[in-house]
Image (cartoon, helix red, strand yellow):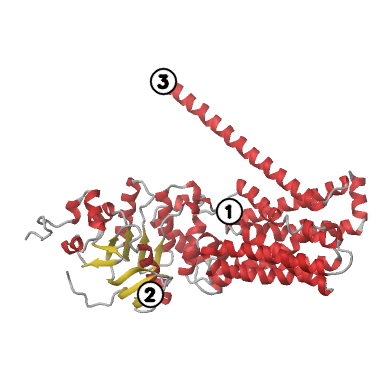
Amino acid sequence: MEEKSETPVILLRNVWAGYDLDTVLEDVSFDLYQRDYVGLIGPNGGGKTTLIKVILGLLPPRSGSVSVMGTSPQEGRKYIGYVPQLQVSDKAFPINVWDVVSMGRIKPGLSSLRLSSEDRQRVEEALRQTGMLDLSKRSINEISGGQRQRVYIARALTAQPRILLLDEPTASVDPQASVQLYELLARLNEEISILLISHDMTAISAYVKTIGCINRRLVYHRDKSISADMLQAGYECPVDLIAHGMPHRVFPAHTEDGEPLE
Amino acid sequence: MINFLREVLSYEFMRNALLAGVIVSAACGVIGTLVVLNRIVFISGGIAHAAYGGVGIAYFLGLNPMWGAVGFSLLSSLAMGYVNRKEKARADTIIGVMWALGMALGIIFVSLSPGYKADLMSYLFGSILAVSAGDLRLMLVIAVVVLAFVLVFYRLLLAISFDEVFSTVRNVPVGWLSMAMIVLIGLTVVITMRVVGLILVIALLTIPPAIANLFVREMRSIMVLSTGLSLLFTISGLLISYALNLPSGAVIILVASLGYAAAAAFRQLRARGRMRKEASGAKNTFEVIR
């Protein structure tokens, strides 16, 4: 665990958040720094989506503070490239790849009513970066899940974000395509901080730099592995993790009662 | 045929009716596409029926019912738009209540008004043959406002229709835009009501985009094709109803529905034909490999 002196690009301090009577996030504190590549894993219903909403300024926290690039989420989210989870209903919408990606160039104000030549250049660049340029005229229902995920990443990239925020990027993507997706993200991470949230930790763990757990509370030590205290805190995700296999990638060697072997 | 058209065009009410058909088709094709893609058909139906409250009240007060309809549809579209954004979980119930409340108000005020009321049936079932020059002016103004708005804000409307959350994150004024869109739907509903009646408004708003969506895969092409189809259905329905002496609103919707059935059948056949072609193609390849 290293100490950082620079200011984090995303900072959450003692955040509590939820809906009506239901508290979903309890006392969450978290920092994302430049060039970080963090995977947060957690079960469904563990507050993954709520955490994303809080970071994007879509849900004000009940207490605690959130800042993005040193300012409020509403102001700072223009630096975030948000890549939502694929929805089945998107496929029914009549729109082509180019038009989806160019949505990323929308800014507040009247200049967004028409695409400028700079906008076009950025769209083309993002399509090339994600390997989708050849399919730019295809309708969104004519491409695979993995390709659609790339389209959403391209859309996020057009705004030249400092942070990529991905929600379940491999949920409806076949295994080979998800390997390619993670390779793409690793390349992008050379310049952009990445925060990836998923319930599928088998894939995450092999590619991210550091890993954390979210299940109402968040446990994160800037480590590559799931620590014993995450287990002891009674989180579901490490149990899932064992069931999903690949424990050698995420677990440090440990004794039966969870103490690390040194 | 030529004589028939000459006869039709010799009547002022038919000329007005055809002109109304053209104007309404343009607004309907464009707005109907947004209604279908945003899945707010229920709200459009709600606005159409709630507008009857305005018709009844205006009639009771001795005003032009058309203006009552405009006022009520503006009010109800604002209310329904608000409910749809702020009360997502219960929106359809509340909109259903407003739908019924508007109708009930209309019926009560109409029954309280003295005198002959045959004219009011025309708001339920349409009266494109009774369109006056004043009505035409109102239709034209509304259609121009609707088309100008969609033309100017097309890119943002596409963005909020496709992905509202992403648009919010990009700081698009989603709330403002979708409210404006629903108000324009309300105004379009009022002018469409004159053509096919409030009960059949939903059909003319949704059938042309539904057909267009079978053949083209981009929002702007669906808008253009829907406008064309709407024009085709309105004008041919109008001429058929004139020739056979049937109620024009109902004939227009009948023609549109038949058009939808034909389009769906055509698409099915085409898909089957393609599959057969591919299957035989595959067989040939297989033969070659063997």
| Mark 3 lies on residue | B290
Quadrant hosting residue B154: bottom right
Q: Residue at x 71, y 57 (%)?
A: B201
User: Which is in the foreground here, disc 3 or disc 2?
Assistant: 2
Nearer-the-camera pick, A226 or A174: A226
Chain that bears disc 2: A
For residue B135, side relative to residue A148 (left or right): right
Chain that bears disc 1: B
Q: Residue at x 65, y 56 (%)?
A: B223
Residue B152: give x, y in percent of width and height. Answer: 62, 68
| Mark 2 lies on residue | A61
Residue B11: give x, y in percent of width and height. Answer: 92, 56
Q: Amino acid at mark 2?
A: Pro
User: Which is in the foreground here, disc 2 or disc 1?
Assistant: 2
Q: Amino acid at mark 3?
A: Arg
From mark 3 to mark 2, how far is it between C-alphas?
67 Å
Chain that bears disc 3: B
Quadrant hosting residue B198: bottom right
| Mark 1 or mark 3: whose residue is earlier in sequence | 1
User: Which is in the foreground here, disc 1 or disc 3?
Assistant: 1
Q: Secondary structure at mark 3?
A: loop
In which quadrant is the N terminus of chain B drawn?
Answer: top right
Residue A157: give x, y in percent of width and height. Answer: 40, 63
| Mark 1 lies on residue | B218
Q: Secondary structure at mark 2?
A: loop
**Residues flagged by tags 2 and 1 on a common chain:** no
* Mark identifier at residue A82: none
